[in-house]
Image (cartoon, rainbow, N blue to C red):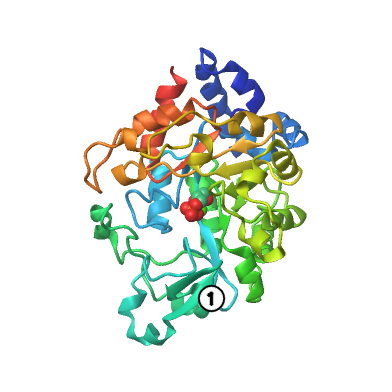
Amino acid sequence: MGPQESNEQAQENAPSTGRRALLGAAVLGASGAVLGLSGTARADARHGGRGMKSLPVPTIVAHRGASGYRPEHTLGSYQLALDMGADIVEAGDLVPTKDGHLVCRHEPEIGGTTDVADHPEFADRRTTKVLDGVSTTGWFTEDFTLAELKTLRATERIPANRPHNTLYNGRWEIPTFEEVLQWQEEQTRKRGKQVWIYPELKHPTYFRKLGLGLEERVAKVLRKYGRNKWNSPVILQSFEPTSIQRLNKLVDNPLVVLLSGASTRPWDFVETGDPRTVADLIKPAGLREIASYAQGIGPTLDLVIPKDAAGKLTEPTTLVTDAHKVGLVLHPWTLRNENPFLPADFRKGTDADAYGDVFGAYRAYFATGIDGIFTDHPDTGLLAREDFVNG
Ligand code: G3P
Ligand code: CA
């Protein structure tokens, strides 16, 4: 989205000739962000969009980096995402260490994404915990110091779907959030183009109960690097609405509430006794409330287009329209090239590591008017956007 054009205007222009103008404006907006604060961007902030309105639309978010091609949440995965041209890199999902540092792992349990099981010195750290109500066995970042975690190496999480990625097992260490911010600065300078990141706070209630509150730590690090402002190229996300509300008091960054399946309840709601489910949050009143403290929502794709019993796409819901009505952008997750992750009508054959008709799936989702999408394969997403924008 270019700073010259609001999301609402973009919706009115699409899908005809306006699409070309839309991306053109978006590209101008992205380069403008390098130069700092524009007058139009200030106007965007008044409208609640904060700096994120300078991004191309539909925005291609590299989910855990280019995780379709490299072990997720490594500097190798983040770097490849930028090389492919991703608009934003989800760097990272943030979890804390025992000594209070923030590191990039999808979950605190790291048995499936590192070589920790091959380290006999950590064998006695393997344990079972209840994580957001789910019994989970393995090794947990909160039981390791940063120095200990730095002795581990990242591995491919889903080798059955991504056998080629195992080539890179052992190549990269676990990045810290501070290293990501330093990398962002360095890459922005080298490329002459603003690099955006989209960190997620994982399990905030769980970690607060352990004395490892995430929000204050994230805010402190962002302040240290001067990236806590409304126009900073850092969007923050969480599945827990109260975490986003807490962040809203600590920093001025764009904020996004993640939404899982309609029948689920955010874990902070479970802990505080708030009876509402995601189905309640996506009603107009729920969306209005979210819009009072956040700029966007990150719904699972099924909330945008539900699937039938056979796993095929049905008709889009009214979520895109309803969210746009209250000024929220939508960045749903997650589109992946491989068959098992695609709607059944876009699969090709049955091989778990083979690609399906992901371009067909992009067409269906982009046609709903979403503002962006998380994908493990940013190169594919960018081509799909090109097709979409060029009509
Ligand atoms: O943050 C968007 C998407 O990543 C949410 O799901 O589980 O991959 O963090 P997850
Ligand atoms: Ca995430």
Percent coordinates x, y for residue 2 in the rendering: 60, 27
Residue type pointed to by label 1: Glu
Q: Quadrant of residue 3?
A: top right
Residue at left offset 62%, top offset 18%: 12
Secondary structure type for disc 1: helix
Q: Quadrant of residue 221?
A: bottom right
Res 185 visible: yes
Residue at left offset 46%, top offset 22%: 389
Res 4 visible: no
| Nearer the observer, 6 or 278 | 278
Residue at left offset 46%, top offset 78%: 128
| Nearer the observer, 159 or 175 | 159
Residue 184, placed above or below residue 350: below
Residue 291, placed above or below residue 241: above
Percent coordinates x, y for residue 119 in the rendering: 33, 81
In the rendered image, the quadrant that contains the N terminus is top right
Percent coordinates x, y for residue 163 in the rendering: 24, 55
In the rendered image, the quadrant that contains the C terminus is top left
Residue 128, placed above or below residue 391: below
Residue 373, placed above or below residue 255: above
Numbered circles on residues, count: 1
Asked if disc 1 is less than 8 Å from ligand 1, the answer is no
Residue at left offset 56%, top offset 61%: 202
Residue pointed to by mark 1: 142
Farthest residue toward the front?
309
Crowding at label 1, few (<14), some or many (≥20) Cα neighbours within 10 Å? many
- Horizontally, residue 345 falls left or right of residue 189, namely left
Percent coordinates x, y for residue 285 in the rendering: 74, 39
| Nearer the observer, 102 or 275 | 275
- Horizontally, residue 209 falls left or right of residue 59, namely right
